[in-house]
Image: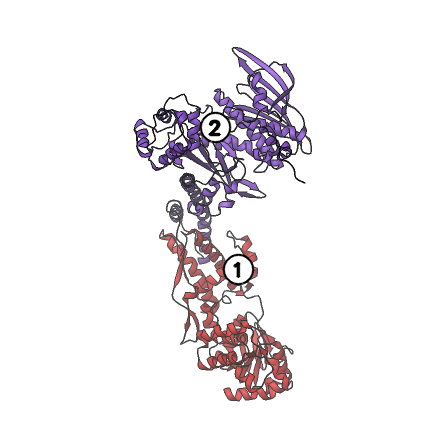
Chain colours: A purple, B red
């Protein structure tokens, strides 16, 4: 039976962003019980850290995870950030793609999906509403409001069930969510490990965490200053597409295309614009709105052929080697730690990035697997721990390509070490929407290798010195024990008196202490 | 000076070496002849393996060597005490005694090695030092009278299994005998066959049951009867590479004991059979050579101890026929055949 087109299109619907993600929650990273909960922690923690830092507040987060039933949890997450004004609360927590993070800036989150995603997951698995208490300053007065709401996925906005003013002690947001179909785990991918790693990447934060058994973990801050806020930087010519140019042309207030180029792109001088005009033959004095797609394409192709200065790096704020060391010392309590922050480099010609690395040896470094300590790799992007998709990540790939034997680590997999790598960039090249692994750009691989090899050399020195000291002590002890025994027994054998042997003992022990290894026959 | 005094003096001199260095404020060191394969050489003149002249130094200033020296000095004191008191101890007993010393042996293997170090350093056998192997030697049957301490033993009147060679064979005196030769056989089965068939009377011989690879005491016994009593020694083993080699170790010594081969090897002893030629000539029941037999035969053909023509011919012949035969396979022709036919024919040919 034939059907008419109109009839067929009766079923054609428009999905809101919320509805789309309701059907595709794995695209928000919510796949698997352990991973889902870790992703919730990730979204809430990064949001709180970003909010506090932007407001110039040293972040302090309290997380309370209660278990009601087999896989039914209640999560209460509280921060000390600036809070959210009443009118924005449902926008932040119920509208997908709403947020302040769509700029060319180094930041933890990027898409404006995070918080609303958590609310969505909560609602999908339990049907229960979310409850938010927000304390914020309105002029000089501290206001407090408690809102209970659901998410209307069809309309992509919040549905307020209850709202009342409450008294609060300070600014900050507290959100309470119910979850089912999630699981709290101490594994490498679990929520606890996520917090621990967050602390290493963010030594200026304080997190208190009460786990489902009631145990309270307090992660104190190791550094007392708020990292400077990253600045927005103009895109580099080599990093833009024709579509980007058309988008800029539509939204600009410049009258001419040439002034649009110089004001919206970095490293773009009048001289450069003239060169482009000469090469392409396009009249750049025309109004931006008259720019055609083909022309934009031609300009981008010309960018690719030209030499530009590397993009400005003022927008990149690394954690810094001292801060990383503090974080590692606080959390891993290692015998030895070495850290490094590399100079900014670029990949794909126009995106700048910085690699930071640290290595910790001994103490709580490494992961206990059964009875055995295994090496662990902690990957970070813009201070955020990457917990999943380790195998495909550029950081893992680069670390695997290092010949650890050359640095005194004979069996890398089973060494008591933790390796920390953080990539800082305005556009971290993630491999997928889950944002859990970094694309293996050649420049990134190279930088990670250089960084780790540098700190591995320091570690090797430490391990060597430690081993030598231990052997020396052992050796000296052997001599002190055995020389008197041998001389006494030799005297018994020869049936003579024991001679004075202090000089000989001094000779051999000194030899052990200062000449190092004595060659065997 | 008797042997006991020589041994005690040699042991004391080891202590002196150390004390002298100490008195001169030098770091004491002991020279220990090297027992590595590169220092074990076949002496064509003597016809057995000897140690070359390379040696290693054990220095008190070396962390690995110092514990070896400590162990050695303790073992030397232990041995001196044994020799003085006219006692012997097994290596295992010494290992347990060492529990009370200020230096550890990791395991018995380590204490055995230190025992060997002392042997090579002093140029004495462990039997000289009072250290006895665990196992007894072979059985001897025939008209020989020996004195062990104050007991006289005649090996014809010690039961059907004969006199068992004691680990302390060096202390034994040969008093009297009326035999003309010695025939050593690999298995006790053949030993008893020869006793039952009165072979000792027929051939005027001592019968020695080796029980497989000859123990040190057995080899020492064979060397002594060969050299002190001038008796020719014949060896009859299974006709396979392993039987060949049991004979060869008696004749030319082993590489492992190169440092004491001058006291153990009997270069004039002769291999009687079973040879590959015997297998063919007597049409003996056989087994096919296994891969490992073939491998071993090829090894033997390259061994300097087997370089003379007779051996080379027999090894090649066995490889060619691809067969081996046990010494008891002569019973195909009746139990008495080996004594009535084979032995007389072989002795005729060899003497």
> Where in the figure is residue A433, as x and y percent of width and height?
53, 35
Front-most of A33 and A410? A33
Residue with the most extreme right position: A69
Residue with the most extreme top position: A140
Report which quarter residue B201 is drawn in.
Answer: bottom right
In this view of the protein, can residue B145 be seen by the observer? Answer: yes
In this view of the protein, can residue A230 be seen by the observer? Answer: no
Q: Where the C terminus of chain A falls, by quadrant?
A: bottom left
Residue at mark 2: A107
Determine if the magenta segment contains residue A232.
no
Q: Separation of disc 1 and disc 2 at Cα?
A: 67 Å
Q: State the residue at coordinates (54%, 20%).
A: A80
Q: Residues within 10 Å of mark 2 (few under 14, many from 20)?
A: many
Up-down: is B30 above or below A282?
Answer: below
> Where in the figure is residue A205, as x and y percent of width and height?
51, 26
Is residue B183 left or right of A214 when viewed as pictured? Answer: left
Front-most of A130 and B75? A130
Q: State the residue at coordinates (67%, 26%).
A: A128
Residue at mark 1: B109
Quick one: SS at disc 1?
Answer: helix
> Where in the figure is residue B150, as x and y percent of width and height?
58, 73
Q: Which residues are magenta?
A: A96-107
Q: Mark 1 belongs to which subunit?
A: B
Q: Where the N terminus of chain A falls, by quadrant?
A: top right
Up-down: is A400 above or below B314?
Answer: above
């Amino acid at each position: 039976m034939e059907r008419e087109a109109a009839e067929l299109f009766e079923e054609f619907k428009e999905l809101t962003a919320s509805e789309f993600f309701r059907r595709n929650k794995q695209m928000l990273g919510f796949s698997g019980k352990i991973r889902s909960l870790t992703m919730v922690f990730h979204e809430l923690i990064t949001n709180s850290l970003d909010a506090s830092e932007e407001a110039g507040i040293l972040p302090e987060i309290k997380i309370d995870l209660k278990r009601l039933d087999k896989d039914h949890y209640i999560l209460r997450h509280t921060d000390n950030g600036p809070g959210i004004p009443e009118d924005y609360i449902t926008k932040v927590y119920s509208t997908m793609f709403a947020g302040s993070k769509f700029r060319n800036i180094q930041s933890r989150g990027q898409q404006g999906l995070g918080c609303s995603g958590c609310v969505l997951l909560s609602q999908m698995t339990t049907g229960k509403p979310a409850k938010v208490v927000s304390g914020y300053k309105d002029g000089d007065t501290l206001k407090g409001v408690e809102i209970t709401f659901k998410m209307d996925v069809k309309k992509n906005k919040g549905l307020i069930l209850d709202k009342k003013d409450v008294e609060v002690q300070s600014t900050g947001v507290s959100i309470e969510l119910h979850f089912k179909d999630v699981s709290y785990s101490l594994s490498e991918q679990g929520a606890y490990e996520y917090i621990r790693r967050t602390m290493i990447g963010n030594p200026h934060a304080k997190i208190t965490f009460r786990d489902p058994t009631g145990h309270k973990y307090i992660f104190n801050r190791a550094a007392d200053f708020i990292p400077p806020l990253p600045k927005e930087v103009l895109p580099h010519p080599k990093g833009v597409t024709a579509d980007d140019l058309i988008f800029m042309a539509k939204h600009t207030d410049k009258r001419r295309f040439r002034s649009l180029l110089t004001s919206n792109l970095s490293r773009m001088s009048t001289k450069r614009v003239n060169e482009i005009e000469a090469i392409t033959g396009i009249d750049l004095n025309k109004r931006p709105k008259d720019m055609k797609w083909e022309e934009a394409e031609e300009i981008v192709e010309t960018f690719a052929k030209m030499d530009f200065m590397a993009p400005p790096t003022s927008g990149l704020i690394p954690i810094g080697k001292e801060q990383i060391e503090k974080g590692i010392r606080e959390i891993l309590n290692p015998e030895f730690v070495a850290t490094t922050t590399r100079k900014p480099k670029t990949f794909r010609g126009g995106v700048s990035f910085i690699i930071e690395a640290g290595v910790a040896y001994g103490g709580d470094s490494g992961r206990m697997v059964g009875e055995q300590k295994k090496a662990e790799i902690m990957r970070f992007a813009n201070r955020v721990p990457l917990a999943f998709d380790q195998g495909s990540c550029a950081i893992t790939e680069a670390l695997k390509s290092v010949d650890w034997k050359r640095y005194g680590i004979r069996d890398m997999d089973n060494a008591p070490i933790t390796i920390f790598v953080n990539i800082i960039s305005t556009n971290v090249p993630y491999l997928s929407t889950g944002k859990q692994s970094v694309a293996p750009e050649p420049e990134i691989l190279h930088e990670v290798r250089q960084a780790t090899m540098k700190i591995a050399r320091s570690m090797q020195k430490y391990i060597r010195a430690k081993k030598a000291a231990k052997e020396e002590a052992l050796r000296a002890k052997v001599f002190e024990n055995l020389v008197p025994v041998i001389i006494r027994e030799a005297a018994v054998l020869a049936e003579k008196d024991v001679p004075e042997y202090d000089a000989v003992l001094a000779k051999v022990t000194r030899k052990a202490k200062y000449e190092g290894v004595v060659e065997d026959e | 000076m008797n042997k006991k005094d020589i041994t005690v003096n040699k042991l004391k001199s080891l202590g002196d070496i150390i004390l002298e260095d100490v008195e001169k404020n030098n770091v004491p060191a002991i020279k220990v002849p090297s027992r590595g394969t590169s220092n074990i050489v076949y002496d064509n003149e003597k016809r057995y393996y000897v140690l070359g002249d390379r040696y290693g130094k054990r220095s008190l200033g070396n962390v690995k060597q110092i514990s070896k020296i400590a162990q050695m000095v303790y073992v030397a004191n232990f041995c001196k005490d044994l020799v003085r008191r006219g006692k012997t101890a097994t290596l295992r007993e010494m290992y347990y005694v060492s529990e009370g010393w200020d230096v550890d042996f990791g395991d018995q293997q380590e204490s055995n090695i230190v025992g060997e170090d002392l042997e090579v350093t002093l140029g004495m056998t462990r039997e000289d030092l009072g250290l006895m192997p665990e196992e007894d030697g072979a059985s001897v049957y025939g008209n020989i009278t020996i004195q062990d301490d104050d007991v006289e033993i005649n090996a014809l009147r010690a039961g059907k299994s004969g006199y068992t060679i004691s680990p302390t064979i060096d202390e034994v005196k040969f008093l009297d005998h009326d035999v003309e030769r010695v025939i050593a056989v690999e298995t006790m089965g053949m030993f008893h066959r020869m006793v039952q068939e009165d072979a000792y009377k027929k051939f005027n011989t001592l019968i020695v049951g080796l029980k497989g690879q000859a123990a040190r005491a057995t080899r020492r016994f064979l060397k002594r009867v060969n050299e002190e009593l001038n008796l020719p020694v014949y060896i009859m083993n299974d006709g396979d590479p392993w039987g060949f080699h049991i004979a060869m170790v008696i004749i030319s010594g082993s590489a492992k004991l190169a440092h004491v081969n001058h006291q153990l090897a009997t270069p004039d002893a002769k291999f009687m059979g079973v040879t590959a030629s015997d297998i063919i000539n007597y049409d003996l029941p056989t087994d096919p050579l296994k891969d490992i037999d073939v491998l071993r035969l090829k090894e033997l053909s390259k061994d300097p101890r087997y370089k003379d023509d007779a051996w080379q011919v027999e090894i090649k012949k066995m490889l060619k026929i691809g067969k081996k035969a046990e010494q008891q396979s002569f019973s195909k022709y009746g139990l008495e055949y080996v004594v009535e036919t084979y032995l007389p024919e072989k002795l005729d040919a060899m003497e």
